[in-house]
């Protein structure tokens, strides 16, 4: 069974709306998109990368805003700080990849390194952070966190912002403004490709 399918299987065993289940489903989708970018070419590769970039930006921001403060309490400050640091580093590389573009001769090698670090990060979350969060909160609290996560995703930036990454307080203060700028830029770009 593939890792993405295993994550989906684990998510399906959790109650609807459980924050960990939502995050496991997103991890599975991230794995799928990595594979899609690796195997695609041209315009399809760009679209797959754009989807992956947006999902990672939104996913990591929402984790930092909603999950990380709880993880600090349940898994400990070292665990939460380690995950925030990994996300901060990943955000820098994601910004570099976006600037390079999928047609750049160095993109595929840098993308492969990035994929390894993101998957390693997700596996740390799944082994260390998520179990602590899950055992440290009630079913109702986990569902409430799921609702908050979905809400945070709606105001999260869709492009990497390394200056705020890994810093939950910065995500709360900068994130909504950055999101407005990102989503406007995305809409303009999308409208331009349809004309």
Image (cartoon, rainbow, N blue to C red):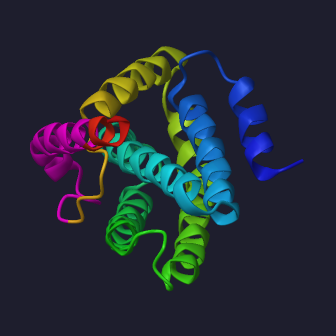
Which residue is pictured at 29% across the width and 58% down the height?
160
Q: Is residue 15 magenta?
A: no
Nearest the camera: 58 or 185?
185
Q: Magenta segment range?
A: 163-188
Looking at the image, which residue is at 56% across and 34% down? 20
Which quadrant of the rendered structure holds the C terminus?
top left
Nearer to me, 190 or 194: 194
Image: 149 above or below 7: above
Quarter assignment of residue 173: top left
Outermost residue, front side? 195
Is residue 164 rendered magenta in the image?
A: yes
Q: Position of residue 114 (x, y in %)?
A: 52, 72
Left or right? Give the position of 188 relative to 48.
left
Up the image or down, 104 lies above or below 152; here it is below
From the viewer's perspective, tell me whether residue 94 is left or right of residue 14: left
Residue 63 position, x and y percent, is: 39, 43
Q: What's the magenta bit mostly, secondary-structure-wise?
A: helix
The quarter of the displayed image where residue 184 is located: top left
Q: In the depicted view, which residue is nearer to us: 30 or 152?
A: 30
Q: Quadrant of residue 45?
A: bottom right
- Work out whether 89 lies above or below 136: below
Q: Residue at x 11, y 47 (%)?
A: 174
Pinpoint residue 21: horizontal percent, then vertical percent.
Answer: 60, 30
């Amino acid at each position: 069974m593939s890792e993405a399918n295993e994550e989906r299987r684990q998510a399906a065993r959790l109650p609807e709306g459980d924050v960990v289940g939502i995050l496991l489903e997103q991890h599975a989708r991230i794995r799928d998109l990595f594979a899609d970018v690796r195997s695609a070419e041209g315009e399809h590769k760009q679209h797959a990368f754009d989807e992956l970039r947006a999902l990672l930006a939104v996913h990591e921001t929402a984790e930092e805003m909603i999950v990380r403060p709880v993880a600090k309490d349940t898994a400990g400050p070292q665990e939460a700080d380690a995950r925030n640091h990994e996300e901060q580093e990943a955000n820098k590389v994601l910004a570099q990849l976006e600037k390079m573009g999928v047609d750049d001769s160095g993109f595929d090698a840098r993308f492969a390194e990035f994929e390894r670090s993101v998957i390693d990060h997700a596996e740390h979350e799944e082994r260390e952070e998520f179990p602590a969060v899950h055992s440290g909160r009630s079913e109702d609290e986990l569902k409430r966190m799921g609702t908050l996560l979905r809400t945070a995703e709606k105001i999260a930036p869709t492009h990497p912002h390394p200056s705020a990454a890994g810093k939950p307080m910065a995500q709360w203060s900068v994130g909504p403004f950055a999101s407005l700028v990102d989503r406007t830029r995305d809409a303009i770009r999308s409208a331009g490709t349809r004309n």
